[in-house]
Image: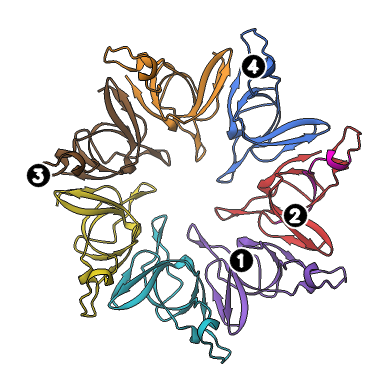
Chain colours: A brown, B yellow, C cyan, D purple, E red, F blue, G orange
Amino acid sequence: MNIKPLGDRVVIKKLEAETTTKSGIVLSGSAKEKPQEAEVMAVGPGAIHEGKRIDMEVKVGDKVLYSKYAGTEVKVGGEEYTILKQDDILAIVE
Amino acid sequence: MNIKPLGDRVVIKKLEAETTTKSGIVLSGSAKEKPQEAEVMAVGPGAIHEGKRIDMEVKVGDKVLYSKYAGTEVKVGGEEYTILKQDDILAIVE
Amino acid sequence: MNIKPLGDRVVIKKLEAETTTKSGIVLSGSAKEKPQEAEVMAVGPGAIHEGKRIDMEVKVGDKVLYSKYAGTEVKVGGEEYTILKQDDILAIVE
Amino acid sequence: MNIKPLGDRVVIKKLEAETTTKSGIVLSGSAKEKPQEAEVMAVGPGAIHEGKRIDMEVKVGDKVLYSKYAGTEVKVGGEEYTILKQDDILAIVE
Amino acid sequence: MNIKPLGDRVVIKKLEAETTTKSGIVLSGSAKEKPQEAEVMAVGPGAIHEGKRIDMEVKVGDKVLYSKYAGTEVKVGGEEYTILKQDDILAIVE
Amino acid sequence: MNIKPLGDRVVIKKLEAETTTKSGIVLSGSAKEKPQEAEVMAVGPGAIHEGKRIDMEVKVGDKVLYSKYAGTEVKVGGEEYTILKQDDILAIVE
Amino acid sequence: MNIKPLGDRVVIKKLEAETTTKSGIVLSGSAKEKPQEAEVMAVGPGAIHEGKRIDMEVKVGDKVLYSKYAGTEVKVGGEEYTILKQDDILAIVE
């Protein structure tokens, strides 16, 4: 992927719903919940506050939970990504 | 649980309504009030203000009261959690 | 009571309407006005601004007037309390 | 009166409409305009900015003009007062 | 006039529409536009930022253009004035 | 023109639509687009941030593009002008 | 092009939808998605924070993804451009 996010933005790719359920039960059809889990594909250089750049807290490869309606969906090279601000990432799932 | 919240976010797990009523009367059915009490499961590293990280005021295991509509509900490993900013936690119940 | 509010929050308990009328006339029924007077039950450690904690202006036991729609009502141990930010307290009644 | 406002709040008491018309004509009934003039009854210690308390610009006894819909009306000891932030006071009438 | 505005507020008095048209044509009836021109009657001491009082840019006697819906209209001594923040004054007409 | 804008405000005068189309084709009637191009007629002294006045980026005579709905239209001396904040000017057209 | 954006604004020109699909499939008609990809045509000098000008992160020639509804569309010299704040640019596509 060749998207370089600006500032404190992050490019993520939604993970399939199956991977978000770790209980071992494979859900299908309407039983699937809207996935809120994604993998970080690219990380911006960080926002600037008071003239200093703030280090980012996530890194490429992190599995993250994010606010369902956050960010902008873009399609690059036939693939769908979401670009959002790091502040819209709720947590890293380890 | 393996969720690591970012910034000043906290992962909480709602406590059953029975545990929120300490008068000894076990409520059931429609008499139960929507629980606003939860246990802290994970705590972020703290927000950064003016380049300094602010220590969090809650810690894992704290019983807390929180704003009913605050935060985002997520399902990880078959369990439901709420991820919210510490500022949406009203008080620690001791 | 065992509620420890966070930041600049305060736990208050509404006083009965009768106690808010000091003219000596006991009001009843629809003549009673919605009480806006409360007693402070617990006080948070204070908000942090620019890295310094700001001392609270109210203390436990103060009788206060507060904005009618401010805060969140919680029920702990069978008692109803309101948790609000100190900034929603208008004045101390002495 | 025994109300001690917090921060940069001020307790005022509306003046009767007759006193707001200084032209000598006594208005009555629907000709009266909603009074916007009031007397300052109590003054808070002042807001805190950047760790310093800012002195208040009004003092007890000042006649002031204020924004019609500003503040909260409270009834203490059978008397009606309005508690508002000093910033909602437009001017002192001398 | 005896109104002393607080902070960065200014007391202005609307000029008659005729005086706002300098082309020499006297407009009347519906042809008149809502006047936006006014004379400064009183000027507050200035707002406080970072603990320093900021000097005001307008002075008594200035003819100013202001945002049509800005400010609060008050009637003092039978005369109508508008009290607004200096920031709602667009320009001085010389 | 004798309008002196305050703070970081700028007085502009809309250019006729014909002058905004530089392709040499003279548009007329409904084919004309709402002009967004204007000439700067007067420039304020600049806003004050942190006690320092910030220099303005536009100067009298600049041709500028501005946000269609920004600013306030005023009529002075029979001429129509728009007074807006410099931040509502998008670009200088050279 | 002769547009010089102010502050932290950027002038971009939308790329045709065909160029945004890099999978080699040429889309046409209703299958085309609204393009969100653009080329940077001009870059402002940067915003001023705390008296210091912040360097811009994009440069002329960069291909960028931007928020679909951000910015203002302008027509200069018969060509359509969008002027937006750099913060509305999501990422650089390399």
| Chain under callout 2 | E
Residue D33 coordinates in the image, percent (x, y): 76, 66
Q: Amino acid at mark 2?
A: Thr
| Spot occupied by residue E55 in the image (x, y as percentages of width and height) | 68, 50
Q: Are marks 4 and 2 on the same chain?
A: no
Give the number of marks: 4
Write the start and end of the magenta stretch as one range.
E28-44
- Please check the rendered image and state whether residue E34 is part of the magenta-colored stretch, yes or no: yes
Q: Nearer the viewer, residue C31 or A19?
A: C31
Seen in the image, is B9 located left or right of residue E63?
Answer: left
Residue drawn at 78 percent across, 69 percent down: D30
Of tags 4 and 1, which is closer to the observer?
A: 4
The residues bearing labels 4 and 3 have C-alpha atoms spaced at a distance of 62 Å
Q: State how far apart marks 4 and 2 are (Cα).
A: 43 Å
The alpha-carbon separation of the residues under discs 1 and 2 comes to: 23 Å
| Chain name for mark 1 | D
Asked if both marks, 4 and 1, belong to the same chain, the answer given is: no
Amino acid type at circle 3 is Ile
What's the mark number on residue D56?
Answer: 1
Residue at image mark 4: F31
